[in-house]
Amino acid sequence: MEVFSSKDLAMRAQKKLLSSMATKASVQMFIDDTTSEILDELYRVSKEYTGNRSEAQKVIKDLIKIAVKIGVLFKNNRFSTEELAVAQDFKKKLRQGAMTATSFYEVEFTFDKTVMSEILSSCRDLLLKLVNSHLTPKSHGRINHVFNHYADPELLAKLYDPDGPFRPNLTKICSGLDKLVENETI
């Protein structure tokens, strides 16, 4: 006998619909202003670093799609107790990453691209573990795409170069991260 659940079908439709409408205007319903400003700066950094506007847009779009899909899963209570523990670990690691990123920015000559890259890679691994049984391999690829892009040691080195072109972007990113940490959003 075939198992049918309208709740499952509705959630899948919701995830599909939200992933296809991940435009800046529609996403503002799900992402606060501070996060939006950080995403804008990450886009600018990616665009300048890669020299490829469409690649920069793809990275940010992938990030937004993943965030929205995970939000839908949380809203629909789809995570088991064990997965919720992984989610807590992810949130702690993300918070640690935000505080480390800000600390590296504020205290000159402390930046270590290996440390930052490892934190981002660890966040990626925890997130993949969290969504392993909930999202498709295509979504797993999006997670890898986003985290591998921003964990690139060369991108991080350019971003944190005190005399580099990304200093104004980093200032805005760290200001936003400070707000998110202070508000306990992350």
Image (cartoon, rainbow, N blue to C red):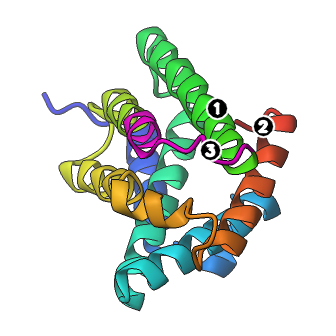
The residue that appears at 37% across and 89% down in the rendered structure is 51
Q: Amino acid at mark 3?
A: Ala
What is the x, y in percent for residue 29? 73, 64
For label 1, the SS is helix
Q: Earlier in the sequence, mark 1 or mark 2?
A: 1
The magenta stretch spans residue 138? no
Foreground of the two, 36 or 76: 36
Residue that numbered label 1 is attached to: 95
Q: CA distance from mark 1 to mark 3?
A: 10 Å
Foreground of the two, 41 or 15: 41
The residue that appears at 38% across and 40% down in the rendered structure is 114
The quarter of the rendered structure image containing the N terminus is: top left
Q: Residue furthest front?
A: 109
For label 3, the SS is helix
Q: Amino acid at mark 1?
A: Arg
For label 2, the SS is helix
Q: Is residue 29 shown to the viewer in this render?
A: no
Residues tagged 1 and 2 counted as in contact (Cβ below 8 A): yes
Magenta span: 107-120
Q: Is residue 154 above or below residue 75?
A: below
The residue that appears at 62% across and 66% down in the rendered structure is 39
- The numbered mark at residue 101 is 3
Q: Quadrant of residue 72?
A: top right
Q: Is residue 112 above or below residue 33?
A: above
Residue that numbered label 2 is attached to: 181
Q: Earlier in the sequence, mark 1 or mark 3?
A: 1
What is the x, y in percent for residue 156? 45, 57
